[in-house]
Image (cartoon, rainbow, N blue to C red):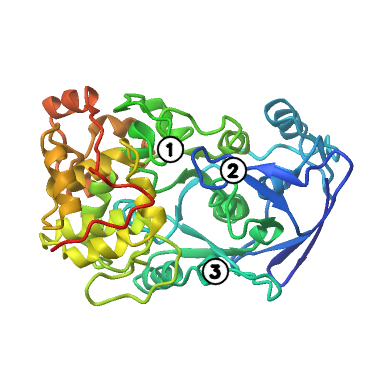
C-alpha cells in the first residue's frame, strides 16, 4: 500500500494507492462483533487535529496511518517519510508489514521526561467516570467521527453516526475547566459496512496528540467487566466465570467471553512508541462507573451509544433501541430507585436485534444483566421471569464496589489520588468480598418461551 500525505489547515489528508498484494476485503479485530468483514471502497480520508497540535514523531504518524487502514494493507506500507529502524523491525515481526521508507538516522520515539497521562473519552458512562476520578489536569482526547453520506446509497437513517451527545458533553466539560481536545476523522468512509470501526480506533487520538502533550501513559474507561468477565460474545459461551488476571488490565481487554481479542489488535505497538497503558477504572464494574456518574453533575448527560436521540426529561441521553442503552438505562433507574415502567421494557423488546440477544442462556455482558435482574423493580413478566432466576443465584451486590487488586495497574503517579477519588463514590471490597468474587461462576438465564422470532412478552 502506498499512502500520500498532505497537511494543511490543521488537517492531514491521505490518499491510498493499492498494490498487487493489498486486500480489497479485510477483517475486523473485534471478536463477537456483528460484522467481521470490511470491504475497501474509498481511497481518501482525513484527520483534523486541534489548533494546539504542534508536531508528530514519524513513528507515531506511521503507526496511526497503518492503524487506520490495517485490514487492507498487504506486505508493505510505503509512506512519504521515513520511520526508525526499531519501529520497522517491530512492525515486521509483530504484524508482518514492511515499512519500505526507513530513516537510519531517526531515533525512535521514546517516553518523554517528564511525561503526562491522557484519557481517551467517548462521552459514555465509563469514560466520564474515568474523567471524574483522574486528576483534573489530565488531558482528555475525544475521537470524533466526521459523518459521510453517499446520497446514491440507500441506508437507514440510524446508520450515519454523528456524535452529537458525546460532543456536547465534551464541550460541557470544557466549560467546567477540564482540558478536552477533539480529533475529527473519517477513515470509516473508506469501508463498507459504514460506519464501523475495525479496531479500537480511539487510540488514533493518542497517536496524533502524544507529542503535543508529552504523553507517556494512556488511560481509557475500560472497566473490570471487559478484563475479568467479558462483554459481547459469538454465542459459543458455555460458562460465565470471573477470571483473576490482573496483568491483562493494561494489555488487551477481551471483547468476547472465552475468546481473547485478536493478538495483533495494535495496542502492543504503542509500547514501542514510549506510551504505556494504565487502568484507573480496571477495578470498577459498569455498576461502579454508573454510580460515580450518577453522583456527579453529569448525571443524565452521558451518551451510551452513537444513535441519535433527543435527551428526554424522563431518561436522559438514551436511544431506547439498542442493547447498550437498555442495559445502561436500567442501571441508572436502579440507582435512582425508580420502578421501571413495563412500557419501557416493551419498547426495547420491540426491536428484533434486542430480542435476539435473550435467546442465549449466557447473555452478552451476562454478569451485568444478572445484577440488573437481581436489583430492578419492575412488574413486566419478562423481567419477573428472569429476576426469579437471578435472585436464586449468587448475590452480585459486590459488583457495585471497587476491586482493590486493580490498584496495581494504575499509574503510580496518580494512584493514591485516584483511589481516594473512587472511594468518595463507592465502597471498597473487603477481603471476603474479593475471595467470593474470585470464585464466582454465574448460572445461565433463560427467558421461557422467548425467541427472536416471537413478539415481546406484553404486560397485562
Mark 2 crowdedness (10 Å alpha carbons): few <14, some 14-19, many ≥20: few
Percent of width and height locating residue 231: 38, 40
189 w.r.t. 261: above or below: below
Using the image as rendered, state which of residue 308 and residue 249 is in the foreground: 308
Task: Find numbered disc 3 in the image and state the secondary structure of the residue it sits on.
Answer: loop
> Which residue matches tag 1?
233
> Which residue matches tag 3?
156
Using the image as rendered, state which of residue 366 and residue 435 is in the foreground: 366
91 w.r.t. 400: above or below: above
Percent of width and height locating residue 112: 57, 43
**Identity of the residue drawn at 88% across and 44% down:** 19
281 w.r.t. 326: above or below: above
Left or right position of 96 against 237: right
Q: Of label 1 and label 3, which has the lower sequence position? A: 3
> Which residue matches tag 2?
36
Callout in the foreground (1, 3): 3
Left or right position of 244 against 114: left
Amino acid at each position: 500500500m502506498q499512502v500520500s500525505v498532505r497537511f494543511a489547515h490543521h488537517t492531514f489528508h491521505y490518499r491510498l494507492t493499492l498494490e498487487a498484494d493489498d486486500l480489497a476485503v479485510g477483517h475486523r479485530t473485534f471478536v463477537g462483533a456483528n460484522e467481521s468483514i470490511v470491504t475497501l471502497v474509498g481511497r481518501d480520508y482525513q484527520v483534523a487535529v486541534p489548533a494546539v497540535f504542534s508536531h508528530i514523531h514519524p513513528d507515531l504518524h506511521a503507526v496511526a496511518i497503518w492503524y487506520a487502514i490495517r485490514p487492507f494493507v498487504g506486505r508493505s506500507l510505503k509512506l512519504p517519510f521515513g520511520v526508525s529502524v526499531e519501529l520497522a523491525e517491530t512492525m515486521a515481526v509483530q504484524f508482518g508489514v514492511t515499512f519500505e521508507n526507513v530513516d537510519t538516522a531517526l531515533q525512535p520515539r521514546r517516553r518523554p521526561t517528564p511525561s503526562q497521562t491522557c484519557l481517551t473519552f467517548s462521552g459514555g458512562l465509563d469514560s466520564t467516570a474515568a474523567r471524574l476520578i483522574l486528576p483534573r489536569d489530565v488531558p482528555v482526547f475525544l475521537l470524533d467521527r466526521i459523518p459521510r453520506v453517499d446520497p446514491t446509497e440507500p441506508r437507514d437513517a440510524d446508520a450515519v453516526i454523528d456524535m452529537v451527545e458525546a460532543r456536547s458533553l465534551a464541550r460541557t466539560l470544557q466549560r467546567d475547566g477540564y482540558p478536552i481536545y477533539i480529533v475529527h476523522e473519517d477513515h470509516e468512509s473508506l469501508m463498507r459496512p459504514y460506519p464501523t470501526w475495525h479496531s479500537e480506533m480511539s487510540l488514533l487520538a493518542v497517536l496524533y496528540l502524544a507529542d503535543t502533550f508529552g504523553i507517556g501513559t494512556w488511560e481509557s474507561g475500560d472497566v473490570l467487566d471487559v478484563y475479568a468477565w467479558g462483554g459481547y460474545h459469538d454465542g459459543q459461551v458455555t460458562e460465565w466465570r470471573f477470571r483473576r488476571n490482573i496483568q491483562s488490565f493494561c494489555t488487551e481487554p477481551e471483547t468476547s467471553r472465552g475468546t481473547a481479542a485478536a493478538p495483533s489488535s495494535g495496542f502492543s505497538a504503542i509500547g514501542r512508541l514510549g506510551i504505556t497503558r494504565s487502568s484507573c477504572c480496571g477495578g470498577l464494574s459498569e455498576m461502579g462507573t454508573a454510580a460515580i456518574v450518577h453522583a456527579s453533575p453529569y448525571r443524565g448527560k452521558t451518551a451510551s451509544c452513537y444513535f441519535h436521540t433527543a435527551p428526554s426529561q424522563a431518561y436522559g441521553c438514551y436511544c431506547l433501541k439498542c442493547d447498550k442503552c437498555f442495559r445502561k438505562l436500567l442501571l441508572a433507574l436502579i440507582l435512582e430507585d425508580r420502578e421501571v415502567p413495563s412500557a419501557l421494557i416493551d419498547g426495547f423488546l420491540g426491536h428484533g436485534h434486542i430480542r435476539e440477544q435473550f435467546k442465549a442462556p449466557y447473555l452478552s455482558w451476562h454478569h451485568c444483566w444478572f445484577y440488573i435482574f437481581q436489583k430492578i423493580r419492575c412488574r413486566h413478566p419478562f423481567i419477573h421471569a428472569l429476576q426469579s432466576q437471578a435472585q436464586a443465584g449468587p448475590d452480585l451486590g459486590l459488583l457495585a464496589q471497587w476491586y482493590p487488586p486493580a490498584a496495581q495497574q494504575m499509574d503510580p503517579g496518580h494512584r493514591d489520588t485516584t483511589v481516594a477519588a473512587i472511594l468518595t463514590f463507592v465502597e471498597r471490597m473487603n477481603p471476603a468480598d474479593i475471595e467470593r468474587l474470585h470464585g464466582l461462576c454465574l448460572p445461565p438465564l433463560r427467558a421461557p418461551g422467548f425467541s427472536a422470532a416471537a413478539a415481546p412478552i406484553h404486560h397485562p
